[in-house]
Image (tube, grey):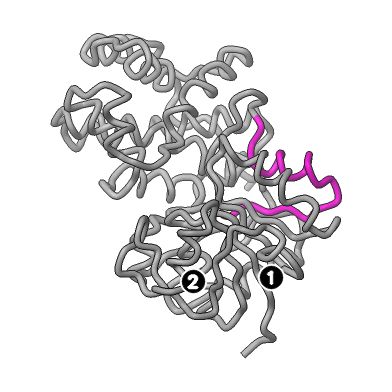
Amino acid sequence: MSETKKVAVLGGGSFGTVIANIVAENGHSVGLWLREQSRADLLNQSHENSRYLPDYRLSENITASSSLEEVLSDAELVFVAIPSQSFRDVIRQAVPWLKPDQMLVSTTKGIEAQTFSLMSEILREELPQARVGVLSGPNLAKEVAARQLTATVIASDCPELRSAVQGMLHSAYFRVYASSDTYGVELGGTLKNIYAIAAGLSAALGMGENTKSMLMTRSLAEMSRFAVCMGANPMTFIGLAGVGDLIVTCMSPLSRNYRVGYALGEGKTLEQAVEALGQVAEGVNTIKHVREKACDMGVYMPLVCGLYEVVFNKAPVAEVVKMLMMNEQSTDVEFVLPRSES
């Protein structure tokens, strides 16, 4: 076995917990930061995160604490699994306990409201010398907890960070691929949350398989069109962090964003849908932020605009669908590789 190392995970939600446990089961010492010491004490006693992953036995190599100093001291690698609206605040609190060249990996799929910053950008702003990465892919936490075969992507421009994450997370059921397109991988994970809401809504309305297929493929075209305008590589979107994450999020009732969309399709208000979920659904706020940014940049995103009208302006779904079907018929595949000369 490789040398035992200290790893920190900030955030005790479902995904932060499974990441902490995979690392711990690989023989490393893991500090897991939770906001409330009472929850940390309970986790240390029961070796279970009863709020988010009941009946999922956690390794005894995990020590939970509400003290950032305790969790971060001497940590070689830090995973940050904090919801986007709290991300910057927690990082600012953590800065005194982080090394200047700290290896930091965001697992959060969201956008900061006021700045349209992705989480990797926040990390670079708050710690300019840090080595930053993003972990994203079709990774439903409950399936990872059940040890279902899963693959993910670690994206970073730092080869040492990519190698460290692959070594610490690789297991018999969890495979980690590498990418240097941090922005594309992160945007893929963020944008697909929007379309998962649309997929849940269409499922609740009883739409057919043709509709689901059209929705997912046009979603992929739309999200890659936006990401390329933001500087991402379009080829990233045919991989795990693009089409892979889109498929799982648009097809699974385990997806929080899908469940919000399904509730909206059943006639619930946005407030009722979010309250029933009881967890953060990043896609709700992402719709608003991406629509504003797309309008600013002049990017054609009819699905985002239509979903915005349904979610925030309570527009009738039938009217929005009619509008979408009457919109400009753009090309099917927009990013085509040139054919080599024969």
Crowding at dot 2, Cα within 10 Å, few <14 / some 14-19 / many 20+, comes out as many
Q: In the rendered image of this protein, does residue 207 appear above or below residue 91?
A: above
**Residue 167 image point, x, y percent:** 63, 75
Q: Is residue 306 above or below residue 94?
A: above
Left or right relative to 68: residue 319: left
Is 233 left, or right, of 58 in this rendering?
A: right
Q: Say which residue appears at 24% left-offset and 9% top-offset.
A: 319
Secondary structure beneath disc 1? helix
- Residue 132 image position (x, y, % from top left): 73, 53
> What residue type is disc 2 on?
Asn
Q: In the picture, residue 125 is in which quadrant?
A: top right
Disc 1 marks a residue whose amino acid type is Ala
Residue 230 appears in the figure = yes
What residue does disc 2 label?
Answer: 21
Viewer-proximal residue, 186 or 3? Answer: 3
Q: Which sits in the foreground, 18 or 138?
A: 18
Residue 162 in picture, x, y percent from top left: 68, 64
Residue shown at 71% from the left, 46% from the top: 93
Query: With 198 as the anchor, is 328 left or right in this view?
Result: right
Q: Residues within 10 Å of mark 1 (few under 14, many from 20)?
A: some
- The residue at the far left in this view is 206
Q: Residue furthest front?
A: 38
Q: Position of residue 139 (x, y in %)?
A: 43, 56
Question: Where are the magenta residues, as a range?
Answer: 117-135
Residue beneath label 1, please? Answer: 164
Q: Write down the quadrant of residue 33 in the picture.
A: bottom right
Give the answer, above or below, for where 134 lies relative to 237.
below
